Amino acid sequence: MKQTISLSQPFSTAVAPRAAISTRRKLTLGWLMRELIDRLHRWRMLSRERYLLQTLSDGMLKDIGISRLEAEREARRPFWDDRVTRR
């Protein structure tokens, strides 16, 4: 059986109809739990890194190119303030 592609059909559903289904499958309890665990782990690591940044000496901060003021400002940010994972 030959499959024909309609020009009015979105490319993703015309070429790979399973691709559209797989995005809906992600919204399961297991996926949500994994996302929650990953987020909590990331927040814990951020909190620890910010604490350790605060404890570095001025010489160490100079080595990595950060001033004491920048280190203090970063350390004061709340653990959930994660600019990397924002979407």
Image (spheres, rainbow, N blue to C red):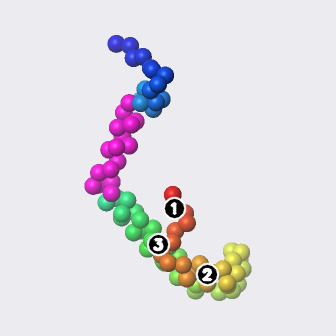
Element type at marker 3? Answer: loop
Q: Percent x, y for residue 12?
A: 45, 32
Image point (36%, 64%), residue name? 37
Q: Secondary structure at mark 2?
A: helix
Instruction: Using the image, determine if residue 19 lies above or below residue 39.
Output: above
Q: Which mark is residue 73?
A: 2
Q: On the image, numbered disc 1 is attached to which residue?
A: 86
* Residue 19 x/y as whole percent: 40, 36
The residue that label 3 is drawn on is 80
**Numbered range of the magenta stretch:** 17-32
Question: Identity of the amino acid at label 1?
Answer: Arg
Residue 27 appears at what percent x and percent y? Answer: 32, 50
Q: Earlier in the sequence, mark 1 or mark 3?
A: 3
Disc marking residue 24: none
Q: CA distance from mark 2 to mark 3?
A: 15 Å
Which of the 4 image quadrants contains residue 44? bottom left
Residue at 55% in and 82% down:
76
Quadrant in which the N terminus appears? top left
Whether residue 82 is situated above or below residue 34 in the rendered picture:
below
What predominant SS class does the magenta segment belong to? helix
Q: Residues within 10 Å of mark 1 (few under 14, many from 20)?
A: few
Q: Residue at x 32, y 44 (%)?
A: 25
Q: Name the residue rendered at 39%, 69% in the picture.
A: 40
